[in-house]
Amino acid sequence: MARETDEERRLSASSAHVEDATIEELADAAERTDERAVRRTLFGWRELVSTLIPIALVALAARNVDWAGTWATLQRTGVPLVVAALAVYYVTFPLRSARWARLLREGGADLGWRDLLRILFLGWFVNSVVPAKLGDLYRSYLVKRRFGISLSRTVGVVVAERLLDLFVVFGLLVVGGYVAFGRTILPDLRIVYVTGAALGALMAGGLAGVYFVAPRVARFFPEEVRRIGRLFREGMLHSFRALPVAGPLTLLVWAAEAARLALVLASLGLELPLSGIVFVAVASSLLTTVPLTPAGFGFVEIAMVYVLTEGFGFAQPDAIAVAVVDRVVSVLSVIVIGAVVYAASRGEIRGER
């Protein structure tokens, strides 16, 4: 164990680690994060299945939908407010980029938010069109390719970033729910709290495993596997040293997410108290973590309609209109703009070797 600790310290001191040839060969064999693989992934059979699942879910949920009422609500959408919602949403990308850069700097990477902004957006684009959060793996790969930072370490940082988001979302879910509904948990919304509690338990268990269990079982694995694991563990755990900066940035990100939903509601002439806006925003975002579909498509829309109707008494057509406009802002716009950015970046990505 002492030997491993010394080696771990040596790895921590390296500010510009580059994977060795063996790990490069493993990455090439995996063929999951290079530019060719992403193109194949967009049209693979797994992605076809991930598209059919939400279509089936939406079709099942849409059997008793008042589409005429929904269309009437959508027709009164205020375009200026939707544009404002788009602007507020896209402010979150520089904030997320600044947070990511700060987390990476804990591992010795001297990067600024401008260095990572386009890479982050490409990752969001891939997450919007393929399942299993492959966009997070893809943006980690692009950081390795462009800046020479260890893929294992960068993936660990991205995991820490996602955990930070989930911690804040879970906290806002509890606070927003308490302010909106008091101490009584509405029976119809128990599934939301159960989902949040399950995610919280998984996060706590995962962190405990990485911190306490992983170092003890590492000796049973080959040296290369131990090395990759140490880099991942280092990237993940060291990132939490940046909490004094990353924490407030995360709160700003989620404040902007809530502001986006408030503007979407206002564009449709609908109102919710602030606690309700926060609750709906974070409750629906919990389901974007479901890896079965791109951006939680199908699950998020159904959950948003469910929470708005059962929790806040919205008419079904109004709730569906909110879900449609909000997902146009937060997902469809990313797909459209991301496709342009991705196409414009292909040549540069290929050349970054």
Image (cartoon, rainbow, N blue to C red):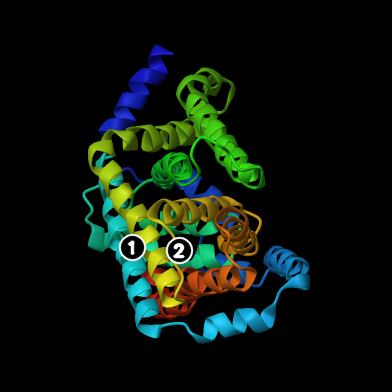
Q: Is 262 placed left or right of 133 in the picture?
A: left
- Determine whether 121 is above or below 144 in the image: below
The spot of residue 76 in percent (x, y) is: 48, 85
The spot of residue 5 in percent (x, y) is: 37, 19
Local crowd at mark 2 within 10 Å, few (<14), some, or many (≥20)?
A: many
Q: Give the structural element (helix, strand or loop) at label 2.
A: helix
- Determine whether 201 is above or below 129 in the image: above
- Determine whether 350 is above or below 79 in the image: above
The spot of residue 135 in percent (x, y) is: 50, 59
Q: Separation of disc 1 and disc 2 at Cα?
A: 9 Å
Answer yes or no: is residue 118 visible: yes
Which numbered tag is attached to residue 101? none
- Please give the name of the residue rendered at 48% of the width and 29% of the height, measured from the top-left corner: 207
Asked if disc 1 and disc 2 are in contact, CB closer than 8 Å, the reply is yes
Q: Nearer the viewer, residue 162 or 344?
A: 162
Q: Which quadrant is the C terminus positioned in?
A: bottom left
Q: As shown in the figure, which amino acid type bears the numbered disc 2?
A: Trp
Q: Nearer the viewer, residue 199 or 210?
A: 199
Residue, disc 2: 124
Answer yes or no: is residue 353 visible: no
- Please give the name of the residue rendered at 70% of the width and 63% of the height, measured from the top-left corner: 46
- Please give the name of the residue rendered at 69% of the width and 63% of the height, measured from the top-left corner: 50
Local crowd at mark 1 within 10 Å, few (<14), some, or many (≥20)?
A: some
- Please give the name of the residue rendered at 49% of the width and 45% of the height, measured from the top-left corner: 23
Q: As shown in the figure, which amino acid type bears the numbered disc 1?
A: Phe
Which numbered tag is attached to residue 93? 1
